[in-house]
């Protein structure tokens, strides 16, 4: 983190931060001193506007939206357009993030690796991702993507639309995740957001009017 100018470390139920941790941190001990410790994943992400899950296990089927991944190079090109708190979520060393944790995130990120040996050591994965972001940050200045409030409103309108059209209950959750993944990968601009909200709002209004008749 210190190598690439990252400072804010959130830890969920970590091991004890002892002398060995500080020895490994070398001259970056301030990151450990300033780290924030949380009891649960949900508590840790409360004030984060855009959540990025990381995993080496991606879906090979477009219909399985949970693990539809964006690759690191594409992600690094777009992420600095976001104006808000971005959280890079790294899982456990042995089995990574749980499905329910990934489902809470806006997008899933994958580092391209060989199919013969796709998994990376956690520290190596962190280093590669932060390096890529550090390089892109040198040339990226745009801030145009929608905020967390706007993103939540967009997801809420989409959910309301599914309810109004009596979308099959057993498909609804997966479809909501699919929509979140599409928006997470697209990182829509303010103009795109307002246009899409206009379409959803008008559709909802027309359906409600028709139901009243």
Image (tube, rainbow, N blue to C red):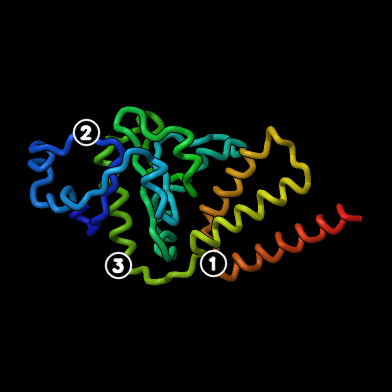
Helix, strand or loop under label 2: loop
Q: Which residue was labeled with disc 2?
A: 15
Answer left or right for 37 relative to 201: left
Helix, strand or loop under label 1: loop
In primary-sequence order, the first of circles 2 and 1 is 2
Q: How far apart are marks 2 and 3 (CA)?
A: 34 Å
Residue beneath the point at 57% across and 40% down = 65
On the rendered image, what quadrant is the C terminus found in?
bottom right
Give the quarter of the image for residue 53: top left
Counting from the top left corner in percent of width and height, residue 205 is at: 78, 61
Answer left or right for 127 relative to 203: left
Counting from the top left corner in percent of width and height, residue 212 is at: 87, 55
Report whether residue 170 is seen: yes
Labels 2 and 1 touching (C-beta < 8 A): no
Q: Which residue was labeled with disc 3?
A: 138
Labels 3 and 1 touching (C-beta < 8 A): no
Q: Which mark is residue 189?
A: 1
Q: Is residue 68 above or below residue 157?
A: above
Q: Which of marks 3 and 1 is in front?
A: 1
Residue beneath the point at 42% across and 59% down = 79
Neighbor class of circle 2 (other Cα within 10 Å; few <14, some 14-19, many 20+) is few
In primary-sequence order, the first of circles 2 and 3 is 2
Neighbor class of circle 1 (other Cα within 10 Å; few <14, some 14-19, many 20+) is some
Residue beneath the point at 16% across and 50% down = 33
Counting from the top left corner in percent of width and height, residue 138 is at: 30, 67
Q: Distance between the residues labelled 3 and 1?
A: 21 Å
Q: Which of 35 and 6 is in front in this view?
A: 35
Q: Check the image and name the residue furthest to the right.
A: 213
Q: Which of 158 and 64 is in front in this view?
A: 158
Answer left or right for 203 relative to 213: left
Residue beneath the point at 29% across and 61% down = 135
In primary-sequence order, the first of circles 3 and 1 is 3
């Amino acid at each position: 983190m210190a190598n690439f100018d990252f400072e804010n470390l959130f830890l969920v139920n970590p091991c004890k931060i002892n002398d060995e941790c500080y020895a490994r941190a070398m001259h970056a001990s301030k990151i450990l001193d300033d780290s924030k410790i949380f009891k649960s994943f949900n508590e840790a992400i409360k004030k984060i506007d855009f959540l990025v899950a990381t995993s080496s296990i991606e879906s090979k089927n477009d219909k399985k939206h949970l693990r539809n991944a964006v690759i690191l190079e594409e992600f690094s090109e777009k992420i600095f357009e976001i104006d808000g708190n971005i959280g890079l979520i790294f899982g456990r060393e042995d089995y990574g993030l749980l499905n329910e944790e990934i489902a809470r995130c806006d997008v899933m990120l994958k580092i391209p690796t060989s199919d013969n040996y796709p998994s990376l050591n956690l520290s190596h994965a962190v280093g590669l991702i932060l390096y890529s972001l550090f390089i892109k940050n040198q040339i990226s200045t745009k801030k145009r993507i929608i905020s967390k409030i706007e993103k939540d409103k967009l997801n809420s309108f989409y959910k309301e639309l599914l309810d109004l059209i009596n979308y099959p209950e057993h498909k609804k959750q997966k479809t909501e995740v699919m929509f979140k993944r599409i928006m997470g990968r697209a990182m829509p601009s303010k103009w795109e957001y307002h246009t899409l909200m206009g379409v959803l709002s008008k559709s909802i209004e027309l359906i409600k009017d028709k139901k009243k008749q």
